[in-house]
Image (cartoon, grey):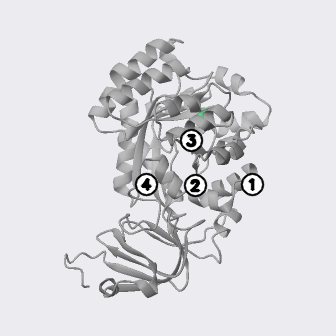
Amino acid sequence: MTSGSGDDTARLWRNARLASFSPALPGIGVIEDAAIAVRDGLIAYAGPESELPAALGKTETIDCEGRWITPGLIDCHTHLVHAGTRANEFEMRLQGASYEEIARAGGGIVSSVRALRAASEDDLVAETLPRLDALIGEGVTTVEIKSGYGLDRDNEMKALRAARRLGELRDVTVRTTFLGAHALPPEMNGDKAGYIEKVVADMLPAVAAAGLADAVDGFCEGIAFSPAEIARVFDAARRLGLPVKLHADQLSNLAGAALAASYGALSADHLEYTDADGARAMAQAGTVAVILPGAYYFIRETKKPPVALFREHGVRMAVATDNNPGTSPLTSLLLTMNMAATLFGMTVEECLAGTTREAARALGLLDEIGTLEAGKRADFALWDIGQPAELVYRMGFKPLHRRVYRGR
Ligand code: DI6
Ligand code: FE
């Protein structure tokens, strides 16, 4: 090793083909006959091997044997920390029960709240690890995890602490999002205004003071919270200096996308019912559209997110699993890409950018991850594929050859 720091992460990955997603290159940013030099967990060089600075070549070298390398995949919208499944509700729905009937029978989101409140932090970590490992096994190096099944201060904080611990237990970056405004907890007896007051005056300040949230999210929907209620949560987030994102226009158009954009949200997510005004506002604000085909598929929604409108207005699109027990029990980001392509007509390039560069943008992390460029973290994935389209095309196949996290 020639690294002056004696750092053991100085390595050269050579004889590779890069899908770099560098904005300086067209499409997926292909670089043939390429090399990636890593120093101190960061990319020191990513480009043609023939142009590699000589000093960077004098180190431990790994021959990639012509394999494709992409940035490490990023799942930018999950509710990965939850307790129990809702497989029983799935069976009830298959037998014809509606969401309302299931909710009346004590099911739905409230059953996940009950289960999470009964679980210890250790239980949550243990239960979530297999889901996290499934994502990691497909080349994921960054995952966003929301709270939203605790719905009181202590249980929301428990879930967020569990999420943080997952990032210590595995070689993966965890970004946490406080989703206190996800649903109304049963003990509030229908008092939405009272609950929002608790969220902004008690829960969010405590979560922020403990450093447990990297962002704040809400569910803006008839069955959840109104735009005015979400605005109160966003105002509180702004006072605390936390970026916001929003579950918007999933089941109806409450102009959630435009609301998110008006707060400069990092992303607006779901967006099945978003209209041209919403798309325009998002484009102007630079708010990323996070497309979640798993929930669309699982609840057999028929209204598709307006991908063509997003393209027309220049809205960036990310793609994520939305892993949650109720509407998207999905732990494959590769299958999610296939769904985005097959169900919504997203292109291979959009799907791959949507789980790398655009997902990084949706998390506010584009300066650090999401592309293979000098200065970014050395998070990447080596694939046993003939062409990048295979990552989107196949279903249920695991083509990951090797995952590199911070150069290791
Ligand atoms: N939208 C969804 O699809 C999930 N949350 C949300 O805001 C549903 C969560 C659940 O049913 O447990
Ligand atoms: Fe969600």
Q: Is residue 46 left or right of residue 383?
A: left
Amino acid carrying label 2: it is Gly
Along the polypeptide, which appears first: circle 2 or circle 3?
3
Query: Which residue does the image show at 30% across and 28% down from the upper left?
Result: 206
Q: Residue furthest left?
A: 5
Residue 348: name its quadrant: bottom right
Residue 379: name its quadrant: bottom left
Q: CA distance from mark 4 to mark 2?
A: 12 Å
Assess mark 4: CB under 8 A from ligand 2?
A: no
Q: Secondary structure at mark 1?
A: helix
Along the polypeptide, which appears first: circle 4 or circle 3?
3
The C terminus is located in which quarter? bottom left
Q: CA distance from mark 2 to mark 1?
A: 15 Å
Q: Which residue is mark 2?
A: 354
Q: Residue 34, image x and y in percent?
A: 49, 81
Q: Which residue is mark 1?
A: 342
Amino acid carrying label 3: it is Ala
Q: Is residue 275 left or right of residue 167?
A: right
Task: Please state the total of marks drawn on the protein image.
Answer: 4
The N terminus is located in which quarter? bottom left
Q: Secondary structure at mark 2?
A: helix
Amino acid carrying label 4: it is Leu
Q: Secondary structure at mark 3?
A: helix
Q: Residue 150, image x and y in percent?
A: 45, 30
Question: Marks 1 and 3: in contact by CB < 8 Å?
Answer: no
